Image: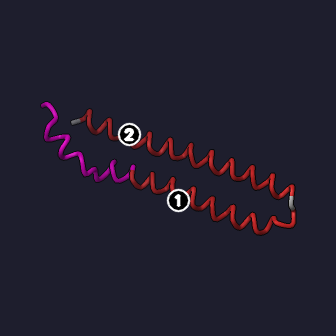
Amino acid sequence: MNDILGLVALACGIIVGLGAVGASIGIALMGGKFLESSARQPELMNQLQTKMFILAGLIDAAFLIGVAIALLFAFANPFAATFIQFAPK
């Protein structure tokens, strides 16, 4: 049983870690492209900034959904009862 809970904790760490890396890379790429485009056309900076903040919120929301799923598996794992039932004793 401890092996199963350890693997669940490892999976939760991987979910959160990879989600954080993906969100960080996505926001960094988007911020770089925003700076590029605002340097080329400064008159569009306000419109681009609004769109950038909306997209940053959506990218961050996807990461937070991953964190919520990891917390679900960590504290209220729906599959744990099945795994523990068939685990060798």
Secondary structure beneath label 1: helix
Count how many numbered circles sit on residues in the image. Answer: 2
Q: Specify the quadrant of the image occupied by residue 12.
A: top left
Residue 61, percent from left and from top: 52, 59
The residue to which callout 1 is attached is 61
Looking at marks 2 and 1 on the same chain, the residue that comes earlier in the sequence is marked by 2
Secondary structure beneath label 2: helix
Residue type at mark 1: give it. Ala
* Lateral position of residue 75 relative to residue 25, left or right: left
* Lateral position of residue 29 relative to residue 62, left or right: right
Q: Main secondary structure of the magenta part?
A: helix
Residue type at mark 2: give it. Ala
Q: What range of the chain is rendered magenta?
A: 70-89
Image quadrant containing the N terminus: top left
Q: Specify the quadrant of the image occupied by residue 10.
A: top left
Q: Relative to residue 5, is residue 50 depicted above or below?
A: below
The residue to which callout 2 is attached is 11
Question: Which residue is painted at 87% across and 62% down in the image?
Answer: 42
Residue 77, percent from left and from top: 28, 50
Question: Which residue is painted at 44% across and 44% down in the image?
Answer: 15
Image quadrant containing the C terminus: top left
Q: Is residue 79 magenta?
A: yes
